[in-house]
Amino acid sequence: MTNLTQVMQYGLYVNGRWEKTPVNMDVLNKYTQESVVKISVATKEHVDVAVKSAKEALRTTFAPYERYEVLMKAAQLLLERKEEFAKILAIEVGKSIRESRGEVERAATTLQVSAEEAKRIHGEGVPVESAQGSENRMAFTLRVPVGVIAAITPFNVPLNLVCHKLGPAIAAGNSVVLKPAEVTPICALKLAELMEEAGLPKGRLQVVTGDGAEIGEWLLDNQDVNMFTFTGSPRVGELIRSKAGSRKVSLELGNNSATVVHKDADLEKATTLVSQKSFNNAGQVCISVQRIYVHKDIYEKFVTKLKEKTEKLVVGNPMDEKTDIGPMIRLSEAERVEQWVKEAVEQGAEIKLGGKREGAFYLPTILTNVNDDMKVCRQEVFGPVVAIAIYEEIEEVIRKVNDSNYGLQAGLFTNDLQFAMKAAREIEVGGLIVNDASAYRVDHMPYGGVKKSGNGKEGPKYAIEEMTEERIIVLNL
Ligand code: NAD
């Protein structure tokens, strides 16, 4: 089992070799703030060698059934080492150990689903003969790999979100240069070891660690990178899009997720699900519930019940089995959330629960009496804070949910079929979750946003569509 009590050093994984560099960066245990791992800092030369060897690897045949076998084997190895990976996640992210185990299981599922999809990549027949003058022709399409994919991933779900890029990219026959988040790179490096053990051919995966902005720029400068798949903040996502030129870009960005609780909702179920899905990973989840719109008839009851359930969440050491919520990723992030809540209170918001910071911990916080222009509503909090507002009319609440720059997912609790279907048509999001909170995801569903939440879909089947090109073959018979 990995011993992260002693500082370990990790190299870059380039051209099938592990290479330690003279310059290192510390990765901290987010609970103790001690350094647990030193990671290598890549130079431009390393990045260029990584891209070159990723490109060269594409010349060697790697058949779909082989991709299937490697990905299935990797999933099996991951499950065998579930506890080891979960402990790393708890240490490097500060995520509770129980939630970390869940992430490892989901990551294994993502790899399995990707493996299954590797066998189902196909084009389609195209009836060109229906055009006048093409009577003696036939056509079909092939889906071919895009080539070298640069995958850049965020800190908050550093194993499963890496699998959401590696799994489909490998299943589709691409090579990947992975740049994990600098504050949580350990799981990605361990995953590369595991992929190697599972038999992934040399060069199909490279992992370069170091400064995000520098490595990002070098990858963008390198024209042998054919596609960028990015999950992270809208600021960086837009920068990548602006510099990628005509290359493919898939962006999974932020959200200020809304969940609507209508007057006919099952309040017991709604408050349980909302309290579970607003504070996971200290709210550092892209679809974490942030804005809650509650119908006026049930507002008081909803707030009381949500408060009762949220009060029971245990904040503490992520390694403790009882803990629900650990620290935020950085002290400065907890301070930012503290500042936003303070500003909301100055503007008239009321703290029903929490509203306190203890070092890098921010306590689960419920705000009421908010307005849509407060930062805690308008921007992405990415912290354990929900803001509850009242509505009266269906049209009004749909307008409020849509009054956002973001559009990843939303939740709606109602048994009114008319409302649910109207919301399905009119709420501007990539996914609407009915009778659950916004933060519902299983790994094979299409997942991705509209507006500033990005473009392109994840979920292996859908990511493979992004990560392949459709080529038409016309036969003149
Ligand atoms: P971030 O944008 O700061 O960093 C993401 C990655 O980009 C990291 O690997 C970082 O090193 C790299 N990076 C930083 N500057 C770069 C640059 N100039 N060029 C290229 N790469 C660069 O995001 P974060 O703080 O790690 O993650 C939080 C954000 O991610 C939130 O906005 C959250 O909503 C979003 N997120 C979205 C999803 C989704 O699926 N839509 C999932 C998880 C997180």
Image (cartoon, grey):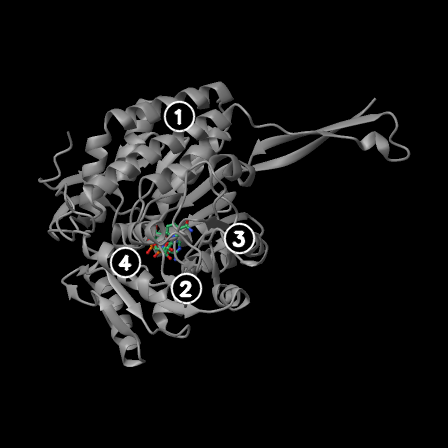
- Residue 330 picture location, percent across and down: 21, 58
Pick out the residue farthest to the left. 6
Residue 101, image x, y percentages: 24, 36
What element does badge 3 sit on? Answer: helix
Residue 326 can be seen in this image: yes
Q: Which tag, 4 or 2, sits closer to the chain's start?
A: 2
Q: To which residue does mark 2 refer?
A: 293
Q: CA distance from mark 1 to mark 3?
A: 38 Å
Q: Residues within 10 Å of mark 3 (few under 14, many from 20)?
A: some
Outermost residue, right direction? 133
Residue beneath label 1, please? 71
**Mark 4 and mark 1: span between their CA atoms?**
44 Å
The mark that comes first in sequence, 4 or 3, is 4
In what element is the residue under mark 4? helix
Q: Quadrant of the N terminus?
A: top left
Q: Which residue is mark 4?
A: 305
